[in-house]
Image (spheres, rainbow, N blue to C red):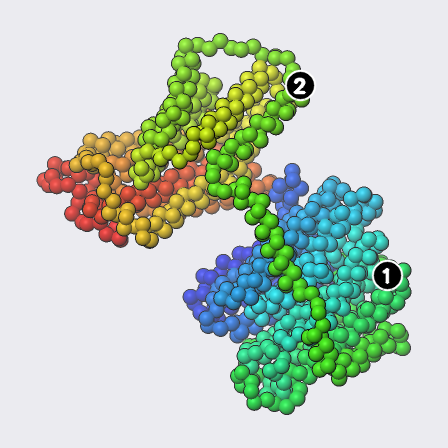
C-alpha cells in the first residue's frame, strides 16, 4: 500500500466516528477500528521490502521553492514506530469501547484519537523536516484535545493546557533547529540531511541547532526539566494515557533523537547534554513515582523515568547503546500500555486509583492481578520477562560509559535508578493486589469482561514471549538498529540471551532488585520523611512563571493596545514616517530618468473630483449617508483612473465591488444613527490632522520620486508578461496571476471572504436569538416610509435585467483567461443581479425561492478550487499548477480548455455565496414586527385584482 494512503487513512477516517455516533457505540468504535486496521494492514504490505533492507519512498512536490515537499520514507525505524502506533492503537480502540461510559461522546473521542494517530504516523514516516514539523505540531494540538477530553474536569483542562504550552514551546525551538540544519545541508529532505554528518558537525551552527532540536525532543518526551507536564496529563481518560504515554506522543522525542542519531550523535556536546538529561530524568522520575499514591501518577512518573533511561542510552553515542534503546522502546511499549490499561480496569471496578484505599485485589480480581503483576515485574527487570533483557543491556552500556571524566557516575546512577524502579514496581504489586481483602472499597472490585482485560493480556503475552525467547525479537531489533545507525555493518553482533554469565550488569541488576525489596521494607518511615522534606513543586513553579509572564504582558500591552483604533493608526503612522524620513536623509536619491507628462483637462477634472470627494468625506464624515455617497464617488474615480492607466480588469473589479459594498453598507447604516457623535477632543483632532498630513505628504513624495525614476531591478511584471501565455495559457496577465502564478493567494482570499460572510451570518443568528431581537423587530423608523415598498416598475425592470446580467456574467467569466474578466468579476456581476431581486421584491419573497443555501455555495466554491489545486498532484506538479490545451469541436473554431477555469469557477461561487449570505443576514435584521412579510413580488399588481399592500401573513419567527 502507498505510504500516502497509510498516512491519509487516519485523517480521512476521522470523519467517520462523528457520522457513526448516532448508529451506536459499537458502530462508532467499529469504524474507528476498521480505519486503523486498514492502515495497519497497509503498513504490513511493505514489510517484505523493509526486511530486505530497502527504503520505501513516496514523493509529491508541494512547495519546491520553499523546500517543502510531501516526501515519505519507510525504513526499519519508521516501520517500527508505525507498527507500535497502529498496533497498540488497535488495542486501545477495543479497550476504549468498553471503558468509556455512555455519557462520553464516543464519536468525538475517536475523532480526536484518529487525528492524533495520523499525526504520529506522519511524524515517523516523514522524509522532509518541514513536513515533519507540521505533523509534530498536529500531535500537540490533537493531544491537547485528547487530554482535555473530559472538559468537566478542571484538572483535565489544566493538564491539556500545560501539555500544549510545554510541547508547543519546544516545538517552536525545534523549528529553529531544523531550519538551521536545512540551511547547513542545502536541503530539507531527511534522507539528504542524514548523509551529511561531517558537514553538519563541522559547521559553527551545529551546537545551536543541536540545542534547539533537543529542546523539542526533551519537551515532547518529558525530559528534565520539562518532565512535569506528563503526570498532569493523567487527568485524561485511561485509554488516552495508555496510548499517548506508552507508545506514541512521549516517544515522538525519542524517535526524533533516534532518527537524527547518525548526524547529531557522537560529539562531546551530544553525550554531555543527552546522557545527563536522561540520567537525571531516570532517577528523579523513579524517586517521585515511588511515593505517589495515585496509581496513574505512579505510572506516569515511571514513564518519565523509563523515557530518561532510553534518552541516556541514545546519549552514549555507541551502537550498543542505540540497540539497547531500540529494544527498550519495544519492551516499554508492551508492559507500560498493559499497566495503564490495568490501572483503568482497577479504577473502573473499585472507583478509585488511590493505592492507600486498595489492597487485597489479588483474590477479587485474579485476571487483572496476573496481567498487572507480569507487566510490573517486567518493568522491575525480573528475569524471564522482556524488561529484564533491555535493563541488562542498559546496565552493561552504563558500565562502559564515562561522563564528566568519571567512570563510576553513570553506572552508579543507572543502578540507583533501577533500584527505585524495582521498588515502585514492588509497591504497585504489594500495596494494590497483596494483603488482606478490605471491606471499605468505594465499590466492590471485580474482574471486568474480556473486552477490557483482553487488550492488556495480548501485550503481556508479548512481554512473556520476548522474555522467555529473546531470539524472536533479535532480528527485528537489529534491523531497526541498522536504520538508527545508518549502516548495517555497525550493528553490534551481541546476541539477545537471558544468561550472559557473571558480568557486572548482572551484579548491578541484583543490587537493584534486592535494593528495591529493601526499600519496600522501610517504605513507611521513608514516606514520612518524604512528606516532611521540603522540595520544589514543578506545577507551582509553572503556574508562577505563567502568571508572571501574563502580568508582564499586561503591563506592556494594555497601555498600547487599549482598543482605540485612532491610537494604533497614529503610532503606526508616526513610526513609518520616522523610519522613512531617516532613510530619506541618510540615503541617496539618483537623478530623475523620466519626465513629467502633461495632464489633459479631462484628467485634471477627474483628479479634482477625486480630491473634492476625499476632502468632503473628511470634513463631513459625521453624516454617515453623505460619507457613503462620497466614498462611492472616490471608488468610481479610482475605477476611471484604472481605465486611464489601461487596467480594465482592475476597473471592472473596483466598479463592481463599489456597487456591492455600497448596497451592503446602506443596509448596515439602516441600524445606525444618522450622524456620528463627536467623541474626540480638539487636541486629538489637531494631532490626527498633523499625522495624516505628514503621512500624505510622505506618501506623495515617495510616489513622485519613484515615478520619475526607473526601477532598481527588473520588476516582476516582466516575468508575468513573458510567462503568462506559455506558462498559464492565457493572454490576460491579471487573470493568469490570480488563478495560476498567485493562485494560492487567491485560494486563501476566497476562504477569508467565505469566513467573513459566515461570521456575519453567525453574528446575525446571535442577535436574533438574544434580547436585541425584540428591539430590532419593534423599532420605528424616524421618517415616513414609502407605501409602495416593492414598486411594479422596479420589479419588472429587475426581472428583465436578470437574464442579461447572467449572460454578461457568463460572458465575463469565460473570456477572463484571455480578455478582461474572470471568476471574481463575474461573481460580483451576478451578485448584483441577485441583489436587485432582493431590492425589488423583498427578502421574504426572494428567499422563499432560494434552492441552494448560500453556505453551500461558498463551500462548493472553496471545495472546487481546492480540488482543482489537488488535481495537479496527480500529474506530478505542485499544488494549483494549471494546465491547458486546445480542442476543436466542429463546427466551432479551435478554442482553449484550461484547468484554471475550474479554479475560477470556485472563485465565482465563493464570491456569489459570500455576497449573498451577507446580504441575506442584513436583510433578516431589517424585518420589523409591525410589517408583514410579502408573499407577492410587488405590492400593487393590477393582475391580482387586489390593490392591497404587502401580503397578509404577519411576520413570524419562522418566516
- Residue 345 appears in which quarter of the rendering? bottom right
Q: Where is residue 862 in the image (x, y as percent from the top left)?
A: 46, 44
Q: How far apart are marks 1 and 2 (CA)?
A: 59 Å
- What residue is at 71 percent from the left and 54 percent from the top? 215
Return the x and y of residue 460 as percentages of the image width and height.
67, 77
Q: Residue shown at 28%/31% (left/top)?
A: 801
User: In the rendered image, which residue does mark 1 sit on?
Assistant: 403
The one of 676 and 279 positioned closer to us in this rendering: 676
- Work out whether residue 115 or residue 486 is closer to the camera in this orientation and state it: 115
Q: What element carries label 1?
A: loop
Left or right: residue 760 versus residue 220 is left
> For numbered disc 2, what is the local secondary structure?
loop
Please report the residue visible at 53 percent of the width from the left and 74 percent of the height from the top.
Answer: 99
Residue 255 x %, y %: 71, 59
Q: Is residue 444 visible?
A: yes
Q: How many marks?
A: 2
Read off the residue under disc 2: 588
In front: label 1 or label 2: 2
Crowding around mark 1 (Cα neighbors within 10 Å: few <14, some 14 to 19, many 20+) is some
Q: Is residue 44 visible?
A: no
Image height of 702 relative to 410, above or below: above
Amino acid at each position: 500500500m502507498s505510504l500516502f494512503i497509510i498516512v491519509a487513512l487516519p485523517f480521512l477516517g476521522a470523519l467517520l466516528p462523528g457520522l457513526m455516533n448516532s448508529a451506536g457505540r459499537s458502530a462508532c468504535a467499529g469504524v474507528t477500528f476498521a480505519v486503523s486496521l486498514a492502515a495497519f494492514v497497509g503498513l504490513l504490505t511493505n514489510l517484505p521490502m523493509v526486511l530486505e533492507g530497502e527504503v520505501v519512498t513516496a514523493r509529491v512536490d508541494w512547495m519546491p521553492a520553499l523546500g517543502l515537499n510531501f516526501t515519505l520514507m519507510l525504513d526499519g525505524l519508521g516501520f517500527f514506530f508505525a507498527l507500535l502506533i497502529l498496533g497498540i492503537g488497535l488495542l486501545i480502540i477495543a479497550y476504549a469501547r468498553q471503558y468509556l461510559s455512555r455519557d462520553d461522546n464516543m464519536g468525538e473521542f475517536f475523532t480526536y484519537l484518529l487525528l492524533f494517530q495520523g499525526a504520529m504516523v506522519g511524524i515517523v514516516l516523514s522524509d522532509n523536516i518541514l513536513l515533519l514539523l507540521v505533523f509534530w505540531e498536529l500531535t500537540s494540538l490533537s493531544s491537547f484535545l485528547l487530554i482535555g477530553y473530559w472538559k468537566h474536569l478542571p484538572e483535565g483542562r489544566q493538564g491539556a493546557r500545560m501539555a500544549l504550552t510545554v510541547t508547543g514551546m519546544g516545538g517552536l525551538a525545534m523549528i529553529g533547529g531544523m531550519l538551521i540544519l536545512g540551511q547547513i545541508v542545502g536541503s530539507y529532505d531527511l534522507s539528504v540531511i542524514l548523509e551529511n554528518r561531517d558537514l553538519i558537525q563541522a559547521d559553527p551552527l551545529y551546537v545551536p541547532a543541536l540545542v534547539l532540536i533537543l529542546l523539542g525532543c526533551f519537551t515532547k518526551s518529558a525530559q528534565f526539566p520539562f518532565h512535569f507536564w506528563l503526570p498532569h496529563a493523567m487527568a485524561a481518560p485511561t485509554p488516552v494515557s495508555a496510548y499517548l504515554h506508552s507508545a506514541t506522543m512521549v516517544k515522538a522525542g525519542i524517535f526524533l533523537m533516534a532518527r537524527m542519531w547518525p548526524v547529531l550523535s557522537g560529539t562531546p556536546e551530544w553525550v554531555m547534554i543527552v546522557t545527563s538529561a536522561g540520567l537525571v530524568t531516570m532517577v528523579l522520575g523513579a524517586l517521585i513515582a515511588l511515593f505517589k499514591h495515585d496509581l496513574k501518577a505512579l505510572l506516569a512518573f515511571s514513564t518519565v523515568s523509563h523515557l530518561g533511561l532510553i534518552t541516556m542510552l541514545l546519549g552514549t553515542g555507541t551502537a550498543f547503546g542505540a540497540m539497547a534503546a531500540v529494544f527498550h522502546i519495544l519492551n516499554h511499549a508492551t508492559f507500560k500500555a498493559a499497566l495503564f490499561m490495568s490501572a483503568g480496569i482497577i479504577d473502573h471496578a473499585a472507583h478509585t486509583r488511590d493505592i492507600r484505599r486498595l489492597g487485597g485485589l489479588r483474590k477479587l480480581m485474579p485476571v487483572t492481578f496476573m496481567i498487572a503483576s507480569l507487566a510490573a515485574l517486567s518493568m522491575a527487570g525480573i528475569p524471564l520477562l522482556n524488561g529484564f533483557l533491555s535493563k541488562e543491556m542498559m546496565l552493561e552500556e552504563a558500565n562502559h560509559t564515562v561522563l564528566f571524566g568519571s567512570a563510576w557516575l553513570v553506572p552508579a546512577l543507572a543502578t540507583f535508578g533501577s533500584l527505585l524502579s524495582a521498588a515502585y514496581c514492588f509497591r504497585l504489586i504489594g500495596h494494590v493486589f497483596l494483603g488482606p481483602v478490605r471491606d471499605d472499597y468505594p465499590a466492590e472490585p471485580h474482574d471486568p469482561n474480556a473486552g477490557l482485560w483482553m487488550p492488556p493480556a495480548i501485550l503481556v503475552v508479548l512481554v512473556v514471549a520476548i522474555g522467555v525467547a529473546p531470539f524472536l525479537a533479535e532480528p527485528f531489533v537489529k534491523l531497526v538498529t541498522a536504520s538508527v545507525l545508518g549502516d548495517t555493518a555497525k550493528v553490534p553482533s551481541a546476541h539477545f540471551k537471558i544468561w550472559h554469565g557473571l558480568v557486572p550488569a548482572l551484579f548491578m541488576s541484583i543490587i537493584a532488585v534486592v535494593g528495591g525489596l529493601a526499600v519496600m521494607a522501610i517504605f513507611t518511615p521513608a514516606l514520612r520523611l518524604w512528606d516532611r522534606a521540603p522540595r520544589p513543586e514543578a506545577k507551582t513553579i509553572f503556574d508562577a512563571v505563567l502568571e508572571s509572564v501574563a502580568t508582564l504582558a499586561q503591563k506592556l500591552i494594555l497601555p498600547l493596545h487599549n482598543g482605540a483604533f485612532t491610537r494604533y493608526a497614529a503610532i503606526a503612522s508616526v513610526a513609518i514616517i520616522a523610519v522613512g524620513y531617516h532613510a530619506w536623509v541618510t540615503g541617496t536619491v539618483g537623478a530623475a530618468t523620466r519626465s513629467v507628462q502633461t495632464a489633459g483637462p479631462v484628467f485634471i477634472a477627474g483628479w479634482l473630483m477625486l480630491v473634492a470627494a476625499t476632502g468632503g468625506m473628511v470634513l463631513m464624515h459625521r453624516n454617515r449617508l453623505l460619507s457613503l455617497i462620497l466614498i462611492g464617488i472616490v471608488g468610481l474615480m479610482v475605477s476611471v483612473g484604472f481605465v486611464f492607466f489601461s487596467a480594465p480588469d482592475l476597473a471592472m473589479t473596483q466598479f463592481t465591488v463599489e456597487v456591492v459594498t455600497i448596497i451592503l453598507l446602506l443596509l448596515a447604516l439602516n441600524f445606525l444613527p444618522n450622524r456620528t457623535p463627536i467623541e474626540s477632543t480638539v487636541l486629538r483632532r489637531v494631532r490626527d490632522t498633523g499625522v495624516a498630513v505628514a503621512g500624505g505628504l510622505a506618501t506623495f513624495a515617495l510616489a513622485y520620486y519613484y515615478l520619475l525614476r526607473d526601477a532598481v531591478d527588473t520588476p516582476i511584471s516582466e516575468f508575468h508578461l513573458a510567462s503568462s501565455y506559455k506558462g498559464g495559457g492565457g493572454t490576460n496577465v491579471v487573470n493568469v496571476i490570480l488563478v495560476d502564478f498567485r493562485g494560492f493567494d487567491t485560494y486563501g482570499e476566497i476562504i477569508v471572504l467565505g469566513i467573513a460572510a459566515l461570521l456575519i451570518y453567525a453574528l446575525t443568528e446571535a442577535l436574533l436569538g438574544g434580547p436585541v431581537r425584540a428591539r430590532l423587530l419593534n423599532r420605528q423608523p424616524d421618517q415616513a416610509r414609502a407605501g409602495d415598498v416593492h414598486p411594479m416598475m422596479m420589479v419588472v425592470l429587475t426581472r428583465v435585467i436578470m437574464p442579461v446580467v447572467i449572460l454578461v456574467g457568463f460572458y465575463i467569466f469565460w473570456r477572463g483567461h484571455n480578455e478582461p474578466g474572470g471568476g471574481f468579476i463575474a461573481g460580483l456581476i451576478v451578485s448584483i443581479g441577485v441583489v436587485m431581486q432582493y431590492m425589488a421584491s423583498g427578502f421574504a419573497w426572494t428567499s422563499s425561492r432560494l434552492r441552494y443555501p448560500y453556505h453551500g455555495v461558498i463551500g462548493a466554491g472553496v471545495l472546487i478550487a481546492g480540488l482543482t489545486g489537488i488535481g495537479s498532484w496527480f500529474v506530478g506538479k505542485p499544488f494549483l499548477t494549471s494546465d491547458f490545451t486546445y480542442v476543436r469541436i466542429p463546427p466551432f473554431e479551435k478554442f482553449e480548455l484550461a484547468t484554471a477555469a475550474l479554479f475560477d469557477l470556485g472563485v465565482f461561487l465563493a464570491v456569489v455565496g459570500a455576497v449573498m449570505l451577507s446580504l441575506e443576514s442584513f436583510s433578516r435584521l431589517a424585518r420589523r414586527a409591525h410589517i408583514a412579510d410579502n408573499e407577492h413580488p410587488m405590492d400593487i399588481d393590477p393582475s391580482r385584482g387586489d390593490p392591497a399592500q404587502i401580503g397578509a401573513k404577519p411576520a413570524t419567527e419562522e418566516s
